[in-house]
Image (cartoon, rainbow, N blue to C red):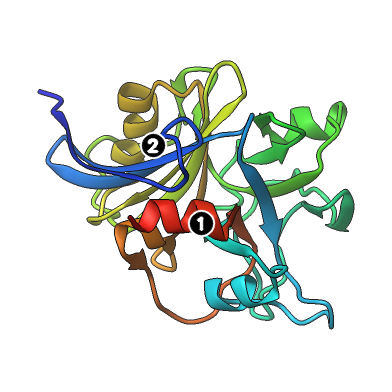
């Protein structure tokens, strides 16, 4: 039986409609899921500082923000090479650093279909990579990763319910209207099938994208969490004002 019990809720802005995290028990594993309302939240991708060096950590991203701004919810957002450059498509503030990759290959990224998170003004979409390449949407920010977790309401066809490949995993899903994203990390090691079902069956997201496993990190200061580990590549984050952050702390 599927069990989904909300255990903890914390606001990351003055109103719950902007951003909200909860820890959920789903099929005997805990997940932390953060919902972000794109109509009000300032959501961006971050990779390099003004000198061209990869940020690598949530703290370095926050240090680079203008005075009066802080980093709210954030997580690693796509697979990266040893130098932490993106494996697939990467667009930040409308500037493309890496092209889209549509071929299959080794590892999770090449487990087709994979996909792209595309962020526009107040809206988002998770788009299968080959469909994206054929008719590229306008993205202010975009990051490619893989595999897709949920594809138009269906789980990725290669996922196995009883697979013993277990990891801490993170990813992103977009609601049907395209104006809310869910940033999710498993707090226990789970397989792909379990992780994907959380997006489809608990969150109801018709499309969701895997970001990574083992190196998965979540920064959610208002629930007292900022995961540590070796430096990462692309980062998806919500920028908030000092006032909003202080309200969340309270």
User: Residue 191, how many percent across, how many down?
Assistant: 30, 47
| Residue named by callout 2 | 159
User: Residue 180, how many percent across, how many down?
Assistant: 54, 29
- Label 2: how many residues lie within 10 Å, few (<14), some (14-19) or many (20+)? some
Residue 31's tag is none
- How much space separates mark 2 and mark 1, taking CA atoms? 32 Å
Tell me the quadrant of the picture where the N terminus can be found. top left
Image height of 175 relative to 184, above or below:
above
Q: In this view, does 29 lie to the left or right of 134?
A: left
Residue nearest the observer in this picture, 78 or 220: 220
- Dividing the picture into quadrants, the one containing residue 122 is top right
Name the mark nearer the viewer: 2 or 1.
Answer: 1
- Label 1: how many residues lie within 10 Å, few (<14), some (14-19) or many (20+)? many
Q: Is residue 53 left or right of residue 238?
A: right
Tell me the quadrant of the picture where the C terminus can be found. bottom left
Residue nearest the observer in this picture, 1 or 47: 47
**Which residue is pictured at 88% across the width and 48% down the height?**
94
- Say how many tags the image has: 2
Among numbered discs 2 and 1, the one appearing first in the sequence: 1
**Which residue is pictured at 77% across the width and 51% down the height?**
89
The answer to whether the residues at label 2 and label 1 have Cβ atoms under 8 Å apart is no
Image height of 80 relative to 150, above or below:
below
- Dividing the picture into quadrants, the one containing residue 160 is top left
Assign a secondary structure to mark 2: loop
Image height of 76 relative to 55, above or below:
above
Instruction: Work out whether residue 145 can be spotted.
Output: yes
User: Residue 176, how many percent across, how many down?
Assistant: 55, 17
| Residue named by callout 1 | 72
Instruction: Work out whether residue 167 can be spotted.
Output: no
Assign a secondary structure to mark 1: strand
**Which residue is pictured at 60% across the width and 71% down the height?**
62
User: Residue 110, how many percent across, how many down?
Assistant: 61, 50
């Amino acid at each position: 039986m599927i069990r989904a019990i909300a255990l903890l809720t914390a606001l990351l802005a003055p109103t719950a409609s902007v951003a909200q995290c909860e820890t959920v028990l789903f099929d005997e594993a805990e997940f932390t899921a953060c919902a972000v309302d794109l109509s009000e939240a300032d959501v961006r991708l971050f990779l390099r500082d003004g000198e061209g060096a990869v940020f690598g950590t949530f703290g370095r991203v926050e240090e680079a923000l203008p005075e009066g701004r802080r980093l709210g919810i954030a997580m690693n957002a796509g697979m990266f090479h040893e130098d932490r450059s993106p494996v697939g498509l990467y667009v930040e503030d409308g500037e493309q650093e890496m092209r889209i990759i549509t071929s299959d290959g080794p590892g999770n990224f090449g487990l087709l279909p994979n996909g792209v998170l595309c962020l526009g003004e107040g809206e988002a979409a998770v788009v299968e990579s080959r469909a994206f390449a054929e008719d590229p949407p306008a993205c202010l920010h975009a990051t490619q990763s893989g595999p897709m977790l949920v594809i138009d309401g269906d789980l990725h066809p290669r996922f196995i319910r009883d697979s013993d490949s277990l990891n801490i995993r993170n990813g992103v899903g977009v609601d049907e209207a395209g104006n809310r994203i869910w940033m999710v990390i498993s707090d226990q090691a789970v397989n792909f099938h379990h992780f994907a079902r959380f997006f489809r069956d608990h969150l109801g997201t018709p499309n969701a994208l895997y970001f990574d496993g083992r190196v998965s990190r979540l920064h959610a200061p208002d629930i007292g969490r900022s995961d540590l580990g070796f430096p990462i590549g692309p980062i998806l984050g919500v920028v908030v004002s000092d006032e909003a952050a202080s309200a969340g702390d309270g």
